[in-house]
Image (spheres, rainbow, N blue to C red):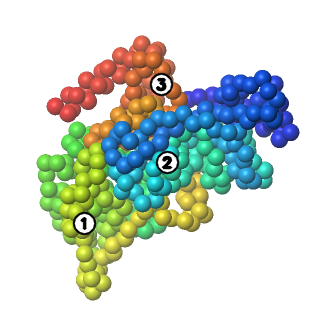
Amino acid sequence: MSEEAPTQQQPPEQEKKADEPPPDAPQESCSSSSSPPAAEEKTIPCRALVLTGYGGYDKVKLQVKALSQPQLQAGEVLIRVKACGLNFAELLCRQGLYELLPAPPVTMGMECSGIIEAVGEEVTDRKVGDRVITMGKSGMWQELVVVSADRTFPMPEQMSFEEGAALPVNYLTAYMMLFEMAGVRPGKSVLIHMAAGGVGIATTQLCQTVQDVTVFGTASASKHETIAQGGVTHPIDYRTKDYVEEIRKISPKGVDIVLDPLGGSDTQKGFSLLKPLGTLIVFGAANCVTGQKKNLLAMAKTWYNQLSLTTLKLMQSNKAVCGFHLGYISDEQLISRTMFTLLELYSQGKIKPRIDSSYHFEEVADAMKRMHERQNIGKVILLPEPKKVEEKPKSNPEPEENVEKTDAAVDEKKEEAKEEVKAEKD
């Protein structure tokens, strides 16, 4: 984990002094000039991942922007980003299937963590040096971001930047679906697809905070041991077995809650699995994404097979069907309240994001490929810090175990991990 920045805030009148670099513009990041400050505006290099067009992995480019000195508005803060989260929604963004992303070229990214380097006027509860989490509809995949202080959340002391970046989208989604929509209670049963992904693991952990909740989770067989250790009661290999039949064998009446990120025919199956008074929540359409680029046939098939109900049928079935999309929730108080609840659960040791792997910005294509091919168990993280020469992507199934090891031991551990992954695939 990087060291924290100084906690003392520079007074506004000192920001232009050359011998005292302002907190929002480290001296080494600004272009040098022999002219007086007023004669030429200084710029700051800022690495960013930009979507240049819709299509394959090559459409996401690492660019270095020349930013002018950020002029913070009242209530804003400048954050030096340390880690960013990769979500399945970004795979949709790259293919032009995510309507909330502005048209290319656009800086991608919905969540990040970092250190506050400057604060604007009227900011009273944040200071320079604070470690925070923030989120937005786009623009988070870059070294420097300016956001409203109200959209920042202080990180617990023991939380790493990678964990901070892994928390917002996945855990907000899981928490709001389980507790705000489905109203999960003791003794209930939940089916979550893609149980080894970010939302799947978040859902499983949150279910453990409620007594006697049974969790059914679909995932490939190689991930079953891990998700079972994480709290999935009944792991099911969706690739080799009919998960509907497997669930019926264990629970003939079905389940109380189905969380569906797949869409299409799987939504119909989920509805059929619901017990009376059960709730189906659709929060994605992963079945639309079959390759690097947009697949019109897969999209048509998914939409053709989607669940279609009349209100009369819904009434007669005594079931509830809901839709959830975090990007369309405009209630900032709800988001803030839920984030602080999640951070408290983290501090209590009840939830903990699982970091699958970390990739530098230069390796964004590899990161997206890993998620697209569903190889990850947990969160895939992007690091703005430039990749060092000969450094390889850091895959951390259990990152805390490697903290005290030497560089040589870490490299050896990585090679062993790669061999294990190959063996599991075979």
Identify the mark nearer the N-term, 1 or 3: 1
Cβ atoms under marks 2 and 1 closer than 8 Å: no
Residue 281 on image: x %, y %: 35, 66
Between 115 and 145, which is closer to the camera in this rendering? 145
Disc 2 and disc 1: Cα gap in Å? 28 Å
Left or right of 86 in this view: 141: right
According to the picture, the residue beneath numbered tag 1 turns out to be: 303
Q: Say if residue 359 shows up in the picture.
A: yes
Disc 2 and disc 3: Cα gap in Å? 23 Å
Q: Residues within 10 Å of mark 3 (few under 14, many from 20)?
A: some
SS class, disc 1: helix
Residue 393 on image: x %, y %: 39, 27
Which mark lies nearer to you, 2 or 3?
2
Outermost residue on the top side: it is 408
Q: Residue at x 41, y 65 (%)?
A: 324
Give the residue type at disc 3: Lys
| Quarter of the figure with residue 415 | top left
| Quarter of the figure with residue 262 | bottom left
SS class, disc 3: loop
According to the picture, the residue beneath numbered tag 2 turns out to be: 106
Outermost residue on the bottom side: it is 312
255, above or below 49, in the image? below
Residue 162 on image: x %, y %: 50, 37
Left or right of 220 in this view: 185: right
Give the residue type at disc 1: Trp
According to the picture, the residue beneath numbered tag 3 turns out to be: 387
Outermost residue on the right side: it is 13
Q: Residue at x 35, y 16 (%)?
A: 412
